[in-house]
Image (cartoon, rainbow, N blue to C red):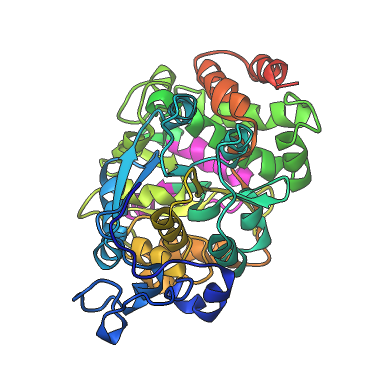
């Protein structure tokens, strides 16, 4: 893409080291003009923090991802000041068909400048096409400074860094209404056995259904079911087995995995337990995950299993707090206090090395962007430069503490790490088949047969 004038350009790692706190890189080119006071945009006040990204007249950077609706509006707002100060127009396009369409666009010679990948496994497969560029030095430097080695590894393929993390979430939260639970005398469970017990108690009470569940997500329908499976695999079989399963070092349908899925089925494949305010088990496959939890607010179901990012789905005027309209507990382990959790996040990869694209990719890897987006509410980042005070609730601050706690055994969402043909293909479809009646062993064996050779 063309731009008429450049005042300063991101130049690499030395600038990042010197300006780490601003997330900016590079020095002005010899002879390049700068405005008095260091503002990056001519005449713009308050742009000092963006000065070293450079200014670009009429430049456009297009970004493609899966973020939609309200979250898309907040994403656009998160980089508004960067746009104003640099002159770069960041044009975001969200799609529910991203996983399929990113390859279509690449094959058609029309890739975006930047893509926000929701799965490391998908990033890895797209890197295999040779179309994703190695991350600029400035992006790599930010990744090394602000994320731990585990998170850095999600954007690394065969030793080369292609992407830095963006947002993050802790999965396995169970959302509920504190006032409803107090009124009915239900206790928050501290072990998986207690999850079974409180589920049975709520069902027997006849007050409401224990669970609201939805696997629907457009072309990505089925992924919410994989979260259930992954949460139970890591909690019942342990992190080592989880790692072996994700890497296909053990069969996909190993007995430990079958047992984990059967335990999930005991909760959500029983009409007595689901689907509060919506219907029976057959409605799970078609109920959109974003809407599935809302009956909690109406007293029609007691619990909804979904990640920390679900805070952004409750809507305006809903208070997320221990004494608010909704709150959440982390799905416990076999024993009280277990610290094994799963989570997810996005990674930003580039298909262009134009200077304005490098500047934008670098900004998105900075703590400044992380704080900007998190302060708008509903999401989190694992960026260590994030000020937790910017999180929109105590629950998100709790999730951030989990991500930063060295005692946490954190594993990325398993299906997101698997080859795309499985993780966002046969497993998603398999979860729909499973919730629609296929038994655990048959479904998992079908996915096992689909694993790329």
Quarter of the figure that contains the C terminus: top right
Q: Quadrant of residue 62?
A: top left
Residue 51 placement (x, y as % from top left) = 35, 74
Residue 249 lies in the magenta stretch: no
Task: Residue at 54%, 13% (x, y): give it.
Answer: 437
Toward the right, the furthest residue is 249
When the figure is inspected, residue 335 is found, relative to residue 258, above or below; the finding is: below
Toward the front, the furthest residue is 31
Residue 284 placement (x, y as % from top left) = 42, 24
When the figure is inspected, residue 333 is found, relative to residue 360, above or below; the finding is: above
Task: Residue at 59%, 29% (x, y): give it.
Answer: 420
4 vs 215, left or right, is left
Task: Residue at 27%, 65% (x, y): give it.
Answer: 81
Residue 254 placement (x, y as % from top left) = 77, 26
Task: State the residue in front, 287 or 80.
Answer: 80
When the figure is inspected, residue 319 is found, relative to residue 259, above or below; the finding is: below
Residue 217 placement (x, y as % from top left) = 39, 29
Residue 198 lies in the magenta stretch: yes
Task: State the residue in front, 332 or 15.
Answer: 15
Q: Quadrant of residue 143?
A: bottom right
- Report the number of numbered marks: 0
Magenta residues, as a range?
Answer: 175-202
Task: State the residue in front, 287 or 358.
Answer: 358
426 vs 259, left or right, is left
Residue 421 is at least partly visible in this image? yes
Q: Main secondary structure of the magenta part?
A: helix
Residue 237 is at least partly visible in this image? no
Task: State the residue in front, 377 or 29.
Answer: 29
């Amino acid at each position: 893409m063309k731009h008429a004038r450049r005042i300063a350009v991101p130049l690499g790692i030395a600038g990042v080291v010197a300006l780490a706190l601003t997330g900016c890189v590079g020095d002005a080119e010899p002879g390049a003009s700068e405005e008095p006071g260091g503002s990056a945009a001519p005449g713009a006040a308050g742009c000092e923090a963006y000065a070293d990204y450079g200014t670009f007249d009429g430049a456009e950077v297009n970004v493609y991802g899966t973020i939609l609706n309200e979250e898309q509006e907040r994403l656009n707002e998160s980089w508004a000041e960067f746009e104003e100060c640099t002159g770069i127009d960041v044009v975001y396009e969200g799609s529910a068909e991203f996983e399929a369409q990113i390859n279509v666009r690449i094959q058609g010679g029309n890739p975006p400048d930047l893509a926000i990948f929701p799965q490391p496994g998908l990033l890895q497969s797209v890197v295999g096409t040779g179309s994703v560029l190695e991350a600029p030095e400035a992006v790599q430097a930010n990744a090394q400074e602000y994320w731990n080695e585990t998170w850095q590894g999600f954007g690394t393929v065969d030793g080369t860094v292609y992407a830095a993390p963006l947002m993050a979430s802790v999965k396995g939260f169970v959302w509920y209404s504190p006032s409803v639970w107090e009124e009915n005398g239900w206790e928050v469970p501290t072990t998986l056995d207690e999850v079974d017990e409180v589920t049975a108690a709520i069902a027997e009470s006849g007050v409401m259904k224990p669970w609201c569940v939805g696997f629907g997500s457009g072309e990505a329908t089925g992924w919410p079911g994989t979260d259930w499976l992954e949460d139970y695999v890591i909690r019942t079989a342990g992190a080592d087995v989880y790692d072996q399963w994700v890497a296909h070092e053990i069969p996909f349908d190993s007995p430990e995995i079958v047992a984990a899925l059967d335990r999930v089925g005991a909760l959500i494949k029983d009409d007595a337990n689901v689907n509060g305010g919506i219907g029976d088990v057959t409605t799970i496959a078609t109920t959109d995950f974003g809407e599935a939890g809302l009956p909690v607010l109406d007293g029609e179901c007691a619990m909804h299993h979904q990640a920390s990012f679900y805070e952004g789905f409750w809507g305006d005027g809903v208070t997320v707090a221990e004494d608010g309209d909704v709150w959440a507990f982390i799905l416990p382990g076999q024993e009280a206090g277990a610290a094994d959790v799963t989570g997810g996040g996005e990674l930003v990869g580039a298909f262009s090395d134009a200077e304005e694209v490098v500047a934008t990719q670098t900004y998105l890897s900075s703590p400044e962007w992380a704080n900007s987006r998190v302060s708008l509410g509903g999401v989190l980042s694992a960026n260590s430069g994030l000020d937790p005070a910017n999180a929109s609730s105590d629950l998100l601050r709790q999730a951030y503490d989990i991500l930063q706690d060295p005692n946490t055994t954190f594993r990325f969402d398993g299906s997101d790490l698997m080859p795309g043909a499985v993780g966002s293909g046969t497993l998603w479809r398999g979860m729909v088949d499973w919730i629609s009646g296929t038994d655990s062993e048959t479904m998992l064996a079908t996915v096992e047969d689909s694993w790329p050779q």
